[in-house]
Every structure is written in C-alpha cells, then in structure tokens.
Image: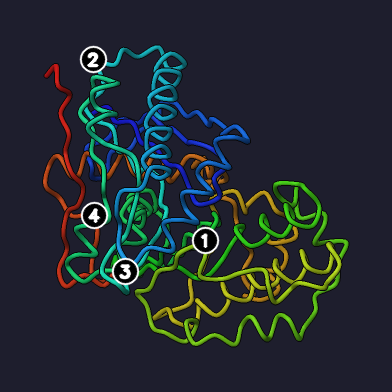
Amino acid sequence: MLAIGLMSGTSLDGVDAALIETDGEALVRPIAFRGEAYSDLARAELAEATALALTFDRPRASPSIVAASDLIVRTHAMVVQKLLRDAGVEAEAVDVIGFHGQTVAHRPDRGWTWQIGDGQALADATGIVTVSDFRSADVAAGGQGAPLIPIYHAALAADLAKPVAILNLGGVANISWIGRDGALIAFDTGPANGLIDHWMEAETGQRYDANGDMAAAGRVEPTVLDTMMDNGWFDLAPPKSLDRNDFTIQPARGLSAADGAATLTAFTARTVARALDHLPERPDRLLVAGGGRHNATMLAMIAAETGLTPEPTDGQGWDGDALEAQGFAYMAVRRLTERPISFPGTTGVAAPMTGGVVHRPASV
C-alpha cells in the first residue's frame, strides 16, 4: 500500500509528512518526505490552545481549540498536496493517510489523551481515507497511549544485531528497546528538546540551541541538575509516558543563558542514562532519531552519561527527521488490516491492540 504519515510534534515547529510503500509488516520503502514549518502566528495559536487544554479536567469544546483544530486540518491538507506534488504521485494512488493531529494534552493518569485535528475533515479535503486518533483506544483500555512508534522501529531494525535501542529526541524523548528474542519495550525517558527550546526562546529569543552551541559555552549547574532529577517519575518502571509540560524550566531560572542551556541539556542526557537502568539488558547500540540528533552537545553528554556512542539513524539509511511521520503511515496500514500498534511492553495495555479511527472521504 501507498501511505502518507503526518506528524506535528510538541515542539510546535511544523508538520512532517512522509510517503512510504508498506505492507504494515516487513516491507517499508520510503518514497518522499517534506517538512513544513509553522508560521509564528500558527505557533502562537497552537501554544495558546495547548495551554488552555492543560487547564481542563477532560477534553471539551472551546472556541480557541476549535480554531486551532481547523488550523491543523488546513495546514496538513496543504502539506499533503505539496508532498504529492514533490513525489509526482496522484492522490488517487494513495491508500491511506495516518494523521497524528496535534497533542494539546496527554493525561493517561486521568484516562484521556487529546489530539486535535478532525480526521473526517482531512479525508474530505484530500480525498484519501484517513486514520486519526491513534492513542485514545489504548488509553481507554488502560494503556499510556504512548509511545506508538516502537512497532515501526522494530520493523526497521529487523536485520540489526540485538539488543538495540532507538532513542527519539523530540520535544519529549522516548526509547524503543528490541531484545535478542524480539521482545519490545518502550517508554518516554523525559524531556528532550522541549525544555531547551523553551529556555532559548525565553532567554535569547531563539527557537532552539543550534548544534548545542549555547550549551557548549555554558557550565552545568549540579545543584539545579540534581533538583530536576529528584523526581519520583524517573524511578517508575516502564511503560510510562509524559506530557511535554510535565517539566518546566523554572529550576534553571537565575542561571545565565549558556549555563541554563548546558544544565537543561545535561538533564536530558542524564534522564536517558536513567532510562537505560529500566531495560532488561543494556543495548549494544543506541541509534538516535529526531531533532536532537543535530545537537552535538546533547549527543556528547548522552555518550558521557551512558557509555554508549549515540549514532544518528541516518547512518542506517533511515531519515531521522522522517521516522515519526513514516511510523504513522505504517500504523495507518496496520489499522486498515486490523493489526496491533500498541503492546503490553510499549504502552502497558493488557493485550496487543490496534488503534485509530478510520474516516472515508465523503466522495467515496
């Protein structure tokens, strides 16, 4: 099947769109990828919707969140058209879209997770069958609803020596561990780029710490780092997941811009090292995807903390910017064929289960 995956992460930097051919099992053939940045206005609108959603005790309609949802659909429909144009593929040739939507709040402890973006509206706008709302069924069944990408990581890593781990450094970091017998364990490890991005924007007006240069110029403040690590969440056995806003930059307030960046980057590195303690066996290799793989200072700190050399997934021929979008395309195909996307070892759900709601275009 030809499938498009769409991912808009908690960093609010833009939409990633990937076109792949897959059977939802071993066959994965990347065809095209496109990243589309949000405008400053769009980022502000989505940030406002997220801040509001986090104040709710459960998802409910609100004018600003409805408007943000409409923005998500418009933006994603536009990116689909651009991706298809880049690939020279007609919409009629695509079997399905995997539409993650935008997470505005993730509260599995309260029995819900909330991704805005109307799947039916996107199906109607593109003329392509669309699968959305991948996480809610898992949460309703007692799972964490995240991370979901591990089943795709396992497909990509099928021929690699085990045990191996794939670390995704997005707004939040998550790790997928694949054992010698194919056992799959995955969980969020802690913040990745989210806190650093927030710090940089607050202290310097820059959206992120390019290559980790600001952190490299600073000094890690051990007292602040120890304070941030003094959180019982890190001691919890997996599976477990986070909302990006579960941690804040507040402990670093008062540090210089460089020292704060260094300390927050060290926090990400140390939480990754702490996560490895929860694995049945240390991985032989640590492959790294997501925007954080471009941060040389972060990778150096992870190496120092873990004793492993982080290897960008690009060295395997896997585009580290495209993996999440590709993963949702892969899971959309699995949903159409009623195969599981979440598992006891990845989200804590009692039994493997599929997820996602299928929307067929009104014209079909």
Q: Looking at the image, which is closer to me, 64 or 335?
A: 64
Question: Which disc number belongs to residue 108?
Answer: 3
Residue under the point 27% across and 35% down: 22
Q: Are marks 1 and 3 in contact (CB under 8 Å)?
A: no
Disc 4/disc 1 C-alpha distance (Å): 20 Å
Between circles 1 and 2, the one closer to the viewer is 1
**Disc 1 secondary structure class:** strand
**Disc 2 secondary structure class:** helix
Residue under the point 40% across and 30% down: 76
Q: Are marks 1 and 2 in contact (CB under 8 Å)?
A: no
Sort mark 4 into few (<14), some (14-19) or many (20+) by Cα contacts within 10 Å. many
Disc 1/disc 2 C-alpha distance (Å): 35 Å
Question: Which disc number belongs to residue 172?
Answer: 1
Q: Quadrant of residue 348?
A: bottom left
Q: Position of residue 23 (x, y in %)?
A: 22, 37
Q: Are marks 4 and 1 in contact (CB under 8 Å)?
A: no
Between circles 4 and 1, the one closer to the viewer is 1
Question: Which disc number belongs to residue 341?
Answer: 4
Outermost residue, front direction? 63
**Disc 4 secondary structure class:** loop
User: Residue type at mark 3?
Assistant: Pro
What residue is disc 2 on? Answer: 92
Question: Which disc number belongs to residue 217?
Answer: none
User: Residue type at mark 2?
Assistant: Glu
Is 289 on the left or on the right of 57, as rendered?
right
Identify whether 362 is placed above or below 223.
above
